[in-house]
Structure formats: C-alpha cells, structure tokens
Amino acid sequence: VVRLTPLVSIDFVVRNVAGEVLVGWRRNRPAQDCWFVPGGRIGKNERIGAAFERLAQAELGAAFRIADARFLGVYEHLYDDNFAGAPGFGTHYIVLAYALDAAAPLALPDAQHARYRWMSDAALRTDPDVHPNTRAYARSS
C-alpha cells in the first residue's frame, strides 16, 4: 500500500499555555531522528473522529475529541524513505492537521518518540533538527 498509494494521517499541533509546540524525537521511519509533532495514520474504514480519539490517546496519552481541536488544514508530506526502510519507494501522506491546547499534563508515550520538548515558533522555524514538515506548523508572527 505504501508503495502505491498515499496514506491519510492526522498531525497534532499541541500548544502549551506559553504558546510552545510539543515535538518528539522520532524513533521510526519516515522522519526518523528529527523533531516532529505527534500524529498517526487513519485506518481503513475508520472514521476521522474515531481515529482522532485513538491517536490522541496513543500519541499524547490523553483523551481528546475532535471537537476539542481546531482544524488547521490539509498538508502533503512526501518522504524518500518508508516505514520498513525498503529500497526503491518513499511515503506519501495526506495530513489533516489539528491544533490542540494542552491545559493539563500529558502522559506522553515512548513508542514513536524517544523524548519530547516544547518549542517556540521561532525555534520550530530555525532549529535544523526540526523536520521541514513540522516547520510548516509554526505561526508566522
């Protein structure tokens, strides 16, 4: 499937009270060894709202509903590699990005990210270890 079709996913642009964005150091391909926002794929026959809730629990360790979020838009992420590291094909994502406010502490898991940090929009734009697809989520002002 990854070789032949785009995948549909959700990215969470989580901000704390200081306006900083939550990023994690990616363990897995694609975007391995970069700062990236949490998120994940929507499954076949999975409704967007159900995927949002499942991914929020898995990626943020907290219960969020899609009604808790603000839709930021549709993004396209293209990668030269794939989850398996197989040669000859990359990964194409169609991403639904949502903004969330983290008023309460999150129980962040370590399956996808080795560690986490909060970054200002300026740092998102300038830190060379932030993946370009995550840079797109920085506020311009």
Image (cartoon, rainbow, N blue to C red):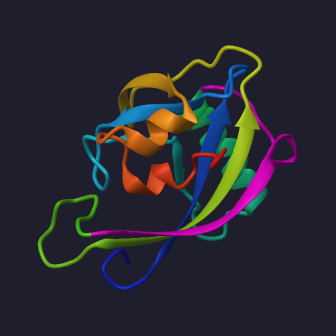
- In the image, is residue 19 part of the stretch drawn in magenta? no
Q: Residue furthest right?
A: 67
Left or right of 13: which side holds 87? left
Q: Residue furthest bottom?
A: 4
Among the 4 quarters of the image, the one containing residue 107: top right
Over which residues does the magenta segment extend? 61-79
- In the image, is residue 63 part of the stretch drawn in magenta? yes
User: Which residue shows up at 36% across the image and 85% down it?
Assistant: 4
Left or right of 93: which side holds 88? left
Residue 70 in percent (x, y) is at 81, 49
User: Which residue shows up at 43% across the image and 24% down it?
Assistant: 116
Q: How many marks?
A: 0
Left or right of 31: which side holds 69? right
Residue 107, placed above or below residue 13 = above
Residue 56 in percent (x, y) is at 65, 38
Residue 115 in percent (x, y) is at 37, 23
Left or right of 9: which side holds 112? left
Residue 95, placed above or below residue 37 = below
Q: Residue furthest top?
A: 105
116, 56: nearer the viewer: 116
Among the 4 quarters of the image, the one containing residue 27: top left
Residue 18 in percent (x, y) is at 68, 20
Residue 42, placed above or below residue 118 = below
User: Which residue shows up at 52% across the image and 51% down it?
Assistant: 40
Locate the N terminus by quadrant: bottom left
User: Which residue shows up at 28% across the image and 52% down it?
Assistant: 29
